[in-house]
Amino acid sequence: MPSSQNNAANDRPVPQNVRNKADGYEDEIDLVDYFKIIWKRKYFIVLGSALPALLAGLSLFLSPGKYKLTYFYDTSLTEKSYKTLLNRFYSAENFAKLSARLRENKIDGHSQGMIPVDVQLEVSPSHFEADAAGTTNIDILQKTQQVEGASLAMTIVGRSQKEVERTSLIVRDNFEKILPIHNAKEELNTATVGFKTKIANIEKGKFDLALELEKKRAILAKLRNLEPASSDKISSGIVLQFDNVSQNSEYLPLNYQIQATESKIIILEETIKENQEKCGYYERLEGLNERLVGELENQASSYYTVQQFRSWLTDIASSYEEEELADYLNAYIRKIENVISTNTPVVEKPSVNPVPKASAKKRSMIVFVLLLVMTAFGAFVLEAVQKHQNPVS
């Protein structure tokens, strides 16, 4: 009987308030256990978080600073031309030329296709993406692409003042003398495509002009075979008004019709002759541009500058006796000279300034917090492993 009474007592449900108190007590015990583990592993946590953070901050504070130099160019660039400039400057081909130039000048710290400094090209004001951000309106996007930046800044960042000074001269030389060659080549190719398009349009309308000319000649021959109407058959007091006499010449008296047709034939003949001369001119310009592009392509693998290209243009200018080609080439030479004269920085020799370091204190705190979380978690893992290996009896 006592045993049955005890079992019955154990089977009775525990009141809710008693269970809540028990659960809260267990949670409190668990929280205390956590603090015990942290206290037990305090040296592991301190050494694993505070010491590395202190070393990181000390390293940042004592690490050598960087230096920078900035060239400002008073040049206007649209968004499209700015992106094109970036693609050309940071291309593997251009960096290979820079790397080769650095080797020639015995500047260390670079490898093939790499340079030992960081070069940044920025347009000021930099508002291209800001104006177009978040809009899908085609008109707004097109207008934004046409907006021009007021100036271009080229900033060169390196590990030492001497490194920046020596490398910046080569980077500037590349920017001012090599990149214009790429622009010239692209512009010449674009102009050649334009000449071919004009020739194609003239050839396309050649048949229609010839057909119209033959038609007018046939009309003229038949008009001349007609007999003019007698004067007594013409009503007096009639006034003819035309908005365009050339399109209504059939209503004119016969002799005036013949004269109008002859005028149209003359206009067609001169138009055909003019188109033939234009075709010949465009073909000669196309050949001249292809020669210029060929020179640039032949020199593509070398450190060929825009100044050397200008000298070559001056040398071949005397070989063109045709006045129209000589004029075209002389105008192009002046254009290249304008590129050379305008592609110079506002300040020839800007100063090299140290780059402000990022706050060592801020970075150290970030490192400390991250390591503190990791080491605290590691302390609990170590405690669990230890209990697993040494179970309490």
Image: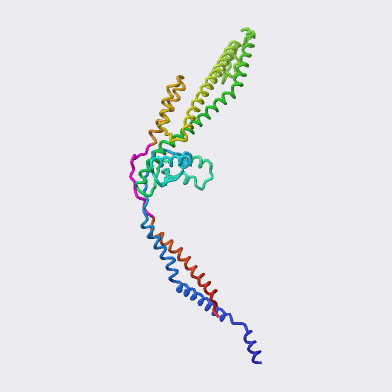
Corner quadrant of residue 56: bottom left
Question: Of residues 280 and 383, which is closer to you in this image?
Answer: 383
The number of discs equals 0
Judge whether 209 appears above or below 188 on screen.
Answer: above
The N terminus lies in quadrant:
bottom right
Q: Tell me which corner region of the image, top left, top right, bottom left or bottom right, holds residue 242.
A: top right
**Which of 55 and 111 lies nearest the eye of the viewer?**
111
What quarter of the picture does the C terminus occupy? bottom right
Please, is residue 150 above or below residue 46 in the view?
A: above
Q: Position of residue 161 (x, y in %)?
A: 34, 47
Asked whether residue 354 is drawn in magenta, I would say yes
In front: 42, or 115?
Answer: 115
Q: Which residues are magenta?
A: 344-357
Q: Is residue 150 visible?
A: no
Residue drawn at x 52%, y 27% is: 195
Main secondary-structure element of the magenta-colored stretch? loop
Q: Give percent across and percent down for residue 189.
A: 51, 31
Q: Is residue 292 above or below residue 248?
A: below
Nearest to the observer: residue 124 or residue 237? 124
Find out whether residue 347 is within the magenta segment.
Answer: yes
Q: Position of residue 303 (x, y in %)?
A: 43, 36
Tell me which colouring the rendered structure shows.
Answer: rainbow
Where is residue 186? Give x, y as percent.
Answer: 49, 33
